[in-house]
Image (spheres, grey):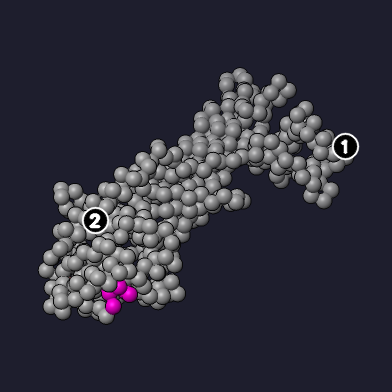
Amino acid sequence: MLDKVSICVIAGNGGNGSVSFRREKFVPLGGPDGGDGGKGGNVIIEGDSSLNNLNYFLHRRYFKAQSGSHGSSGRKVGKNGQDLTLKVPLGTVIKYQLPESEDEHICDIKTHKQQVIVAHGGNGGLGNPHFSSSTNQSPRLAQMGEEGEEVYVDMEMRTIADVGIIGYPNAGKSSLLTASSAAHPKIANYPFTTLEPMLGVVDTNNKSFIMAEIPGLIKDAHVGKGLGFEFLRHIVRTRVLIHLIDGNSEDPLKSMIDVNNELYMYDNTLLQKRQIIAVNKIDIEEVRERMTDIEASFKEAGYEHVAFISALTGEGVPELMSKALFLVQESLAEEPQDEEELPVLHVVEKNTEPIIEKDGDVYVVRYPFLERMIYGSDITNPEVKRQIISVMTRPRMTKQLTRAGVEPGDRVRVGDFEWEW
Ligand SMILES: Nc1nc2c(ncn2[C@@H]2O[C@H](COP(=O)(O)OP(=O)(O)OP(=O)(O)O)[C@@H](O)[C@H]2O)c(=O)[nH]1
Ligand SMILES: [Mg+2]
């Protein structure tokens, strides 16, 4: 079962704007009619309640949404690229960081069809009609489409179970899951039979909840003993823990304290969860005889309520499940009702003002709007060169460049285009 994966997603590029002129009979050169490019598709991650693992990502780690089509003559706007939607199980936590950004975006996919856009498609480039002006009726300028965002996304599935069964290996966790749900985890008389979390649906009192067996917790799990902390993240979001103890073990109280210590080492808030202590295997004669002693030792240590069950015969199991359900409901009632959660969509920041920097003797203008115009136009054409310079020397640009210290004779560069001021 794959429950943790990193993938690379790339949104579609915007299509290029087009340079084109109307062709009419008897009119040698009509007005500009190049269409804008279409928008690139987004990459979206969507919750799907029918999934329970991330296996889809086992063999594919690289995903790209469709790019927008280029604009064409007759003001024909390019088609938008299709979004790419990746489906993940509920309980998946998504983390990603945009290039050149400090902020990490974290999003928790909790509901069916919940969506988050992890990479935005690039905008389409503008066609040449956008560059016409009173002084330039035949603009040969158009914009290249914007690049789609490329983002690395870490996904981690954290089981959403209401109840987690914890306890030393061999305590009978799988047996309890089998006794109370339709799940069929392997049961055997040796430790570490179960190597990954097992889930089952428990029906009790006309209600149901999801219960998970959390395997592998032993003393020193925090330094990697047993299965280590591998699966502890799965209990972070459970509401109730059933702490199952082998009544036949040497020191039931100590084994419980050992496991709770490990929880504490991992995340001390885990001990604030509602926990039911259940001593198992009371069908065994010796265990039955020890029951009062065990109860007394727990009481002495401050644990008032201990349930006694047999996962094998089912004795005490229905009562234990009712108690678990009761505590789940209690925990639900306490939780502040989720204010309508805002979808986590990162805001696309774009510099809307030119930035002027010096690279040696050259003044470099960084401004996506103009850079894309350079890349979208044929700068080998002398007429295009002339038009670019006239856009660059409009009053607003001139003011900004002068303020930055540009003087006649200096070199100025935008994208691949360099000229003398
Ligand atoms: N007599 C008796 N044996 C039990 C009971 N519950 C479990 N067992 C036995 O204890 C052994 C371990 O049971 P599992 O359910 O596999 O225990 P587990 O906690 O899931 O163990 P791991 O997955 O290895 O951590 C098996 O041989 C079970 O048959 C019980 O109530 N009574
Ligand atoms: Mg097991």
Q: Quadrant of the C terminus?
A: top right
Q: Which residue is mark 2?
A: 324
Amino acid type of disc 2? Ala
On screen, residue 138 above or below 116: above
In the foreground, 143 or 359: 359
Question: Which residues are the magenta region?
Answer: 251-255
Mark 1 residue element: loop
Label 2 close to label 1 by CB (< 8 Å): no
Q: In the picture provided, is 283 more to the left or to the right than 122?
A: left
Q: Residue at x 54, y 46 (%)?
A: 148
Mark 2 residue element: helix
In the foreground, 267 or 247: 247
Q: Is residue 6 magenta?
A: no
On screen, residue 207 above or below 244: above
State the image coordinates of residue 229 (x, y, percent, origin top left). Answer: 40, 68
Q: Is residue 252 magenta?
A: yes
In the foreground, 399 or 245: 245
Q: Residue at x 38, y 61 (%)?
A: 271
Local packing at callout 2 (Cα closer than 10 Å; few below 14, some 14-19, many 20+) is many
Spatial separation of the CA atoms under disc 2 and disc 1:
80 Å
* Residue 182 in sight here: no
Q: Main secondary structure of the magenta part?
A: helix
State the image coordinates of residue 317 (x, y, percent, origin top left). Answer: 16, 62
Nearest to N terminus: mark 2 or mark 1: 2
Q: Which residue is mark 1?
A: 408
Q: In the picture provided, is 111 more to the left or to the right than 37?
A: left
Q: Residue at x 82, y 35 (%)?
A: 403
The label shown at residue 128 is: none
Q: Residue at x 36, y 73 (%)?
A: 258
Amino acid type of disc 1? Pro
